Image (tube, grey):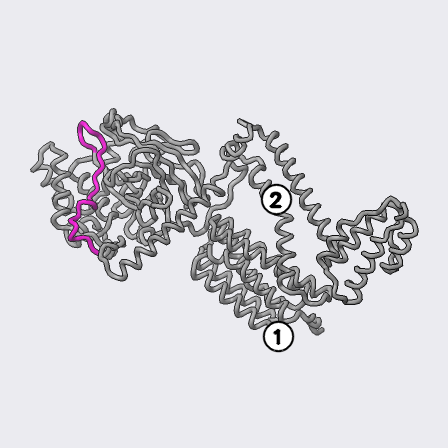
């Protein structure tokens, strides 16, 4: 048995089909790991080129399927997730062109490709993804329209006519889409969640170990945006508190899970307070940050015993949080025996040199814990270097850092400092979060990038409680090497170029924040505020449904009107002539299907004498059929204005 003959598709139709499928695939590929997206793009191009003349052999297609499944497993592992499903969709679409033989296959490919931009929204809802998805959808509609013309064996139409048709389709659906977005009742909480990613985005976690943060600190994408309402904290106060880590096994720091269930410790706050709003980018985790220290947990989150915030649901979409914070003056309650034991816990037999040094400092300082802290900071300031280029730690990693390398970044400084303090009998813990931030001058808000992730220490001092100590900040400026900070003050050409790119990036981030405000943060509360100018203070879901139905019916009426207009004659002269004929049809004087225009006008004139009708019919025939040089503008105007007479003789 031989394969069925391939129906001729035509070069132009094939290019339009493949081009629209490729544009649909682009927004989805941009959300996948770079290497995986490159493999899929390469397979899509090679498959399209190899299947131009004939179908690919079944064995080769099976081999490509298995190869791409292996690539997905290699990049994402065995854990299923949203990105895994989207990767499978992209892989299938990359191979779909191998089945492109006929017009039916072309329509199937374009229809299947439209799933790709919708799948991209499961991974990102930013303006770039939206713009690419809209472009892909428009080109797909254009391709389908061209395929329909080809199937109907209609004469080739210019691109301008096809674009007008696509514009009409957009106008048909736009009012109903806007009514659905703005007016369909929003839920305060979703009915269901969506799966996590198999490969999560970089973000703060509840653990810390050497080398774990290198990818995070090399990522300059925004992690959160902050808008202050009123006073703005000084740079030394812009520490954004995240998970507090207390358990240490000699290599890895972890949160104490029991502290997550306990209420926050009682604190006396300073009079200075800050009120602000955080727009948090998705991480698929639940860790939140707040300016040190948050006064209370915003709705949808919890504040644990260590004053760390945690969302009740995974942060798989952009979220907004309104908070208040104030510095801590003193902790009211002393440490419980369990908390003290936890803050002094160390693994047995590790880092002996650090233990010897700490005991010596304790003997020198007596009971003065603050003196030990200051001595450690002075040692850092005098001897240590900040650099990202650090070797993997060995068994006694703290000893190696403090006595051999004396070079590292915040993970090394905070971890070693806490171990040193615990060996000296001072309760201490590691705090992770972000530090600093860059002000966006266009939107007057602050951006914290993932590379601003930071780790510092807290020590318990008598009479004060937990006190923040940042040993990384104690490094002398002349010994800060190999950082990722912008060096725009040099004044050379490279710095000027970097400055310009920084301005462009800030403008782009301001536009992204505007998109977040307008689209992504439109929830049930924003929907209620939208209707307040119209006198609706508070609407229940049934009232919202009623308003939505009213606007939806209006939108459907708009669609019906446009469709009715779409059935009219394209030729304006013929359209005006038919419209005038319908006016006479109301009096039983409609034109027969094969009746010439002049004959119809003479027949009408016998029943309703009107020389103007005879003159119009003559001018119409001359313009339409004789090709005479007639003033078309004047003729159109007269046809539109003409009305049947009463029938009286002139």
Q: Nearer the viewer, residue 89 or 52?
A: 52
Compared to residue 213, the image places residue 341 above or below, namely: above
Marks counted in the figure total 2
The magenta segment is 460-481
| Image position, residue 228 (x, y; %) | 34, 36
| Image-quadrant location for residue 415 | top left
Question: Element under label 2?
Answer: helix
Q: Viewer-proximal residue, 295 or 215? A: 295
Q: Residue at x 28, y 58 (%)?
A: 496
Residue ID for mark 2: 175
Q: As drawn, is 325 to the left or to the right of 45?
A: left
> Which residue shows up at 50% across the image and 37% down it?
523
Q: Quadrant of the N terminus?
A: bottom right
Q: CA distance from mark 1 to mark 2?
A: 44 Å
In the displayed structure image, the side of residue 448 where residue 394 appears, left or right: left
Which labelled disc corresponds to residue 53?
Answer: 1
Question: Element at badge 1?
Answer: loop
Horizontal placement of 9 versus 379: left or right? right
């Amino acid at each position: 048995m031989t394969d069925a003959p391939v129906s001729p598709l035509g070069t132009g139709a094939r290019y339009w089909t493949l081009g629209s499928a490729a544009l649909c695939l682009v927004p989805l590929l941009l959300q996948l790991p770079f290497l995986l997206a490159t493999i899929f793009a390469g397979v899509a191009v090679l498959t399209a080129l190899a299947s131009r003349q004939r179908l690919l052999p079944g064995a080769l297609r099976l081999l490509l399927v298995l190869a791409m499944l292996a690539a997905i497993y290699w990049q994402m592992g065995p854990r299923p997730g949203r990105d895994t499903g989207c990767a499978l969709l992209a892989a299938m679409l990359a191979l779909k062109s191998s089945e492109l033989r006929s017009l039916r296959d072309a329509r199937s490919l374009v229809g299947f490709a439209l799933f790709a931009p919708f799948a991209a929204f499961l991974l990102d809802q930013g303006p770039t993804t939206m713009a690419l998805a809209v472009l892909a959808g428009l080109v797909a509609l254009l391709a389908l329209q061209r395929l329909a013309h080809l199937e109907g064996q209609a004469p080739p139409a210019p691109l301008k006519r096809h674009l007008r048709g696509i514009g009409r389709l957009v106008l048909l659906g736009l009012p109903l889409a806007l009514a659905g977005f703005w007016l369909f009742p929003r839920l305060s909480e979703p009915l269901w969640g969506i799966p996590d990613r198999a490969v999560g985005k970089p973000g703060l976690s509840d653990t810390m170990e050497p080398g774990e943060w290198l990818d995070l600190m090399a990522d300059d994408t925004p992690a959160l945006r902050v808008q202050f309402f009123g006073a703005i904290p000084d740079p030394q106060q812009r520490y954004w508190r995240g998970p507090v880590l207390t358990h240490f096994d000699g290599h890895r720091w972890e949160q104490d899970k029991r502290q997550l269930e306990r209420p926050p410790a009682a604190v006396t706050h300073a009079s200075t307070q800050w009120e602000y709003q955080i727009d948090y980018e998705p991480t698929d985790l639940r860790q939140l940050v707040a300016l040190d220290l948050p006064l209370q947990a915003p709705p949808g989150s919890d504040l644990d015993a260590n004053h760390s915030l945690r969302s009740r649901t995974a942060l798989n979409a952009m979220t907004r949080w309104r908070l208040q914070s104030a510095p801590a003056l003193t902790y009211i309650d002393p440490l419980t025996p369990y908390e003290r034991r936890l803050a002094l816990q160390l693994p047995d037999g590790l880092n002996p040199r650090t233990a010897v040094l700490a005991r010596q400092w304790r003997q020198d300082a007596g009971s003065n814990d603050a003196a030990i802290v200051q001595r450690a900071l002075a040692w850092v300031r005098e001897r240590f270097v900040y650099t990202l280029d650090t070797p993997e730690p060995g068994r006694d990693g703290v000893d190696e850092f403090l006595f051999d390398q004396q070079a590292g970044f915040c993970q090394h400084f905070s971890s070693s400092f806490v171990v040193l303090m615990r060996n000296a009998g001072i309760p201490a813990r590691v705090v992770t979060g972000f530090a600093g931030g860059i002000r966006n001058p266009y939107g007057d808000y602050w951006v914290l990038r993932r590379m601003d992730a930071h780790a510092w220490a807290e020590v318990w001092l008598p009479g004060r409680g937990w006190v923040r100590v940042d040993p990384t900040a104690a490094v002398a400026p002349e010994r800060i090497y190999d950082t990722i900070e912008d060096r725009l003050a040099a004044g050379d050409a490279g710095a000027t170029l970097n400055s310009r790119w920084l301005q462009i990036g800030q403008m782009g981030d301001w536009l992204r924040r505007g998109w977040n405000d307008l689209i992504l943060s439109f929830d049930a509360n924003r929907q209620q505020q939208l209707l307040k100018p119209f006198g609706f203070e508070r609407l229940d879901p049934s009232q919202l449904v009623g308003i939505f139905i009213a606007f939806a019916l209006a939108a459907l009426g708009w669609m019906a009107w446009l469709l009715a207009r779409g059935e009219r004659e394209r030729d304006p002269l013929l359209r005006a002539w038919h419209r005038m004929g319908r006016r006479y049809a109301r009096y039983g004087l409609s034109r027969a299907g094969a009746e010439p225009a002049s004959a119809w006008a003479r027949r009408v004139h016998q029943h309703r004498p009107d020389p103007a009708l005879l003159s119009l019919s003559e001018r119409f025939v001359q313009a339409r059929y004789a090709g005479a040089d007639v003033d078309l503008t004047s003729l159109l105007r007269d046809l539109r204005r003409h009305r049947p007479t009463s029938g009286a003789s002139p």
